[in-house]
Amino acid sequence: MAEILENQVLHTLGQVIDEKSDRNIVSLGIVKDITVDKGKVSCILEFQDNDQKKNSRIFEDSKKAIEEIPGVTKVDIITTFHREQADEDDKFEAIQPPINNQLGTSKIKYILAVASGKGGVGKSTIALNLASAFKSLGLKTCLLDADIYGPSIPKMIGTNEKPHSDGKQIETVNRYGISTMSMGYMVEDENPIIWRGLMVMKAINEMIEKVNWGEADIMIIDMPPGTGDVQISLAQKLKITASVIVTTPQDIALVDVIRGLRMFEKTDIPIYGIIENMSYFLAPDTGKEYKLYGESKTDVVAEKYEYEILTRLPYDTLLMEQCDKGHPLTDLVPDHKVSKLFLETAENILKRLKLEKLSQTN
Ligand code: ADP
């Protein structure tokens, strides 16, 4: 019941328009949280600028709209103001994708960004297994682990090999037929990495310009979660062909997903859709499917913003175990149900990438 009401509140707030941008306040990321306790609705609105007249109108409109929902007995709205986020969003507005990829001497046909609103949703697992699926479709595939704050690809492919360098170029680390590069190869294990603005730019520049990626059909980028400096640096350096967003059905940070989607919209990178991870549990003995988190919230976002749900992946113990052991499941057991889902998804994405290229050249 509470979940239905929560969705209704989200839907209702999706009708409240910020007159300055002429967009609704959900898509703008202003709605930060909604909680429902019986008929009592509390929500947080985080304004992105300090235009008090406009903000108080949004506040009044939101309160009135929620009060009109049947079953609502009380409405509490907390408002906050986030200057930093406003600055960050302005930065995305200003990004023009580069005319040419700044990949040094390397040439890559398609670049696919795998992003998420927050960490821990399985973004790296999906980036790696998609890369493995593209490889098995016969594509020369590379994987850039741009999650410099928590690089997990070295562990997931079971290596801590240091990349070779002749002082000019850095060679990729190749495993399972995929050429990879990650900041995880450059730093000692377990050391948390503290990056500051300029260092981020430098690290991303090195991984793009100095690494010998050679000629490849596709590059998968494992993006850091959320939005920030790395995304800006990448969008300025690479012509990213398309992006996919990873989420989980119970993702309470729904607004983070929306923020992730908005970032790509602002940089004009096509969003192919949402990959919902851990959608259900697949019993290894019976192959039966169990819903773990009740009704999926992903549908609400997908329907509202007209994004496709590209696939729903189960919570699968073998996928997790193999990730921990350093072997992508798609490579190890290509007949596994989850591997087949990765393969199907890669095939569908590839069809769209090919069409995209065709329309760009015509
Ligand atoms: P992120 O990159 O979003 O931070 P990871 O890919 O590192 O997330 O995944 C976090 C943890 O969840 C890892 O231990 C991974 O093995 C596990 N995991 C991811 N997807 C699944 C899944 N579908 N089934 C089981 N475990 C998963």
Image (spheres, rainbow, N blue to C red):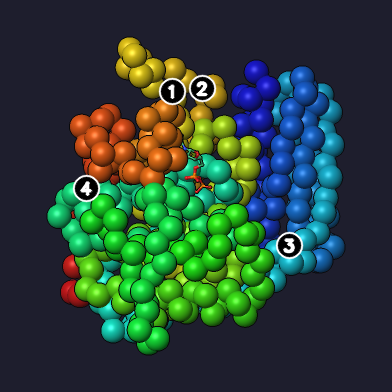
Question: Can see residue 241?
Answer: no
Q: Which residue is mark 1?
A: 281
How far across and how far down the image is residue 206, in percent? 45, 78
Q: Amino acid at mark 3?
A: Gln
Image side of residue 89 versus residue 97, left or right = right
Residue 354's place in the image compared with 248, above or below, is: below
Q: Which mark is residue 292?
A: 2
Q: Quadrant of residue 187?
A: bottom right
Q: Which residue is mark 3?
A: 48
Q: Amino acid at mark 1?
A: Phe
> How much space separates mark 1 and mark 3, taking CA atoms?
38 Å
How far across and how far down the image is residue 272, in percent? 36, 53
Label 1 sits on a secondary structure element that is strand
Is ligand 1 less than 8 Å from the beta carbon at label 1? no
Q: Residue at x 18, y 58 (%)?
A: 139
**Upstream in sequence: badge 2 or badge 3:** 3
Question: Can see residue 213?
Answer: yes
